[in-house]
Amino acid sequence: MPLPFLTADRAHDDDRAGPEAAPLAHVDVTHADVAYEDPERWRRPYRPGPWKVGGAAVLLLLASYLLFSALIIALAGSGSAAGVCVAAAALVMGFAVRMVQAGVRANERGLRRTGLFSSTTVAWQDVASIRTVQQPVRRLGLPLTVQGQAVLAERTSGGAPLPLITSHDTDFLGRPDAFRAAADALDEQAARRGR
């Protein structure tokens, strides 16, 4: 079974190595083998950032401590307190998973912006344009705002634009090249659909 994400990474590594580095014989860098992918599947046009992954790892570590304490409490004979610890661990794990899933995804039908507590889906025919603007943005999602860039989806119905990604969120803080690549990918997907 072809694994296109490995092919893409290998091709990127070969590009950085220079023209003398040739791809391995079994690696097809033309991406012709990705035809099996479902166009209806929601795909994120960027990788989760280190702040998001690190925060989720810390939360999962906390959940493991809660589960271990639940085991100790259950062995000591207090089932209700152990149940509280297990419930707290489940909440922390759910929050960590949702935090990693938060972001922007696109497919053939439209855009979906997933937050911690809600999701917004906009069909491509309802997107007038996608543009990058300079504006105050939140740093790591906290109330502190700094001057940065944001990618906004303007709707055909008017109203407030839908903020998709910012240069200082948990995916792109300290990664300006990744932000530009994600903005370009979103703009390219919108252009492919005639927007």
Image (cartoon, rainbow, N blue to C red):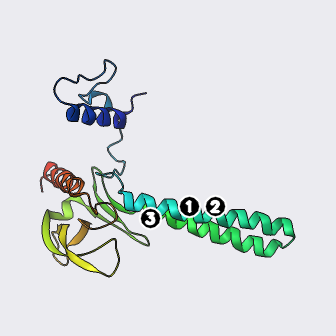
Q: Within 10 angstroms of label 2, few (less than 14), some, or many (20 or more) residues?
A: some
User: Disc 3 on helix, strand or loop?
Assistant: helix
Percent coordinates x, y for residue 130 in the rendering: 15, 62
Dots 1, 2 in contact, CB < 8 A: yes
Q: Which mark is residue 60?
A: 1
Q: Quadrant of residue 89?
A: bottom right
Question: Would residue 69 be found to the left or right of residue 168 on screen?
Answer: right
Look at the image and tell me whether residue 166 can be seen.
yes
Q: As drawn, which residue projects farthest toward the bottom?
A: 143
- From mark 3 to mark 2, how far is it between C-alphas? 17 Å
- From mark 1 to mark 3, how far is it between C-alphas? 11 Å
Percent coordinates x, y for residue 136 in the rendering: 19, 77
The image quadrant where one finds the C terminus is: bottom left
**Which amino acid, by three-letter code, is at mark 1?**
Leu
- From mark 1 to mark 2, how far is it between C-alphas? 6 Å
User: Disc 1 on helix, strand or loop?
Assistant: helix
Name the residue that disc number 3 marks.
99
**Which amino acid, by three-letter code, is at mark 3?**
Met
Q: Residue at x 23, y 28 (%)?
A: 30
Q: Within 10 angstroms of label 1, few (less than 14), some, or many (20 or more) residues?
A: many
Percent coordinates x, y for residue 138 in the rendering: 28, 75
**Which amino acid, by three-letter code, is at mark 2?**
Ser
Name the residue that disc number 2 marks.
64
Q: Residue at x 26, y 31 (%)?
A: 31
User: Disc 2 on helix, strand or loop?
Assistant: helix
